[in-house]
Image: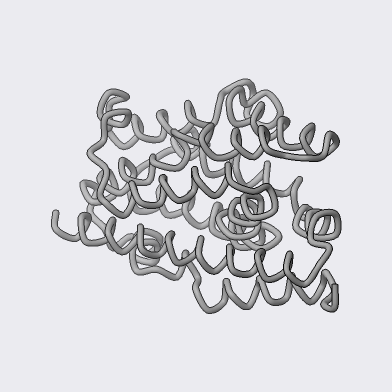
């Protein structure tokens, strides 16, 4: 590989800078308290396409992971998402999201049976497919793109989203645990990008696939937020 791991991570970070998903108007208006409570509820239902169906993403990575040690690490993430027994006091992360919905006034039935916009459905289809197609591409989509470069973006905005929900939308600390738990869990993953690239990205072609996947994933996430934004602003 002619480019160092540090060099690849710098390129990944540059992609995030060009395509900042939390710089999308949907998120900035959310965090600045510029959405109505009904708009926030609509957004929460749409955004459930990720946490409520995470078994389609992390689960597929576990199945196709070629390395026993890394499989053990991926299954720990699956275990935490499903049970919450590592970071969330035994409450699964999908359950935390349902409780977040309830704090906003959304019933569990409404959350599970949301009428997803086309952008959300397109992202779910892409993300499920890439996580089950190839481990290097899947893990790049999940951990280097969707969860942020070295998790720094996710950590910063986990706190900001929780603060906004309390300050502007009337939720309590308990109602925003979905976001604060993820912030704590992600702090345990700060070196994962470096480790993944060092172990699995051995050639220049591997690096090209990593960077292409990060670009594509962020493009699909922004497309999803575009569609969600249109739906939310129509309310």
Front residue of 37 and 135: 135
Front residue of 35 and 119: 119
Q: Position of residue 29 (x, y in %)?
A: 33, 65
Q: Quadrant of residue 69?
A: top right
Instruction: State whether residue 49 is above or below residue 36.
Output: above
Q: Quadrant of residue 57?
A: top right
Q: Position of residue 54 (x, y in %)?
A: 51, 36
Quadrant housing the C terminus: bottom left
Instruction: State whether residue 42 is above or below residue 56.
Output: below
Q: Quadrant of residue 24?
A: bottom left
Instruction: State whether residue 100 is above or below residue 141.
Output: above
Taking the spot 68% from the left edge, 41% from the top edge, the residue there is: 185
Side (left or right) of 17 relative to 200: left
Taking the spot 77% from the left edge, 35% from the top edge, the residue there is: 71
Taking the spot 64% from the left edge, 31% from the top edge, the residue there is: 78
Taking the spot 72% from the left edge, 76% from the top edge, the residue there is: 10
Side (left or right) of 31 relative to 181: left
Q: Position of residue 207 (x, y in %)?
A: 73, 68
How was this image coloured?
one colour
Quadrant housing the N terminus: bottom right
Side (left or right) of 185 relative to 43: right
Q: Position of residue 147 (x, y in %)?
A: 59, 54
Q: Residue furthest left?
A: 234
Side (left or right) of 109 relative to 214: left
Q: How many marks?
A: 0
């Amino acid at each position: 590989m002619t480019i160092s791991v540090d060099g690849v991570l710098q390129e990944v970070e540059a992609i995030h800078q060009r395509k900042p998903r939390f710089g999308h108007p949907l998120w900035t208006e959310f965090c600045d308290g510029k959405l109505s409570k009904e708009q926030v509820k609509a957004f929460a239902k749409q955004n459930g396409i990720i946490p409520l169906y995470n078994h389609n993403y992390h689960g597929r990575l576990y199945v196709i992971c070629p390395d026993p040690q890394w499989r053990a690490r991926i299954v720990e993430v699956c275990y935490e998402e499903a049970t919450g027994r590592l970071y969330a006091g035994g409450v699964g992360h999908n359950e935390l999201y349902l409780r977040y919905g309830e704090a906003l006034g959304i019933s569990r039935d409404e959350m599970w049976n949301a009428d997803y916009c086309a952008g959300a459905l397109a992202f779910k289809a892409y993300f499920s497919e890439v996580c089950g197609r190839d481990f290097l591409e899947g893990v790049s989509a999940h951990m280097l793109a969707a969860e942020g470069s070295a998790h720094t973006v996710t950590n910063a905005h986990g706190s900001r989203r929780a603060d906004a929900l309390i300050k502007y939308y009337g939720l309590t600390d308990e109602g925003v645990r979905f976001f604060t738990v993820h912030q704590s869990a992600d702090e345990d993953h700060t070196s994962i990008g470096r480790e993944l690239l060092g172990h699995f990205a051995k050639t220049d072609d591997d690096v090209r696939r990593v960077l292409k996947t990060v670009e594509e994933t962020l493009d699909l996430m922004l497309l999803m937020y575009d569609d969600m934004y249109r739906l939310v602003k129509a309310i």
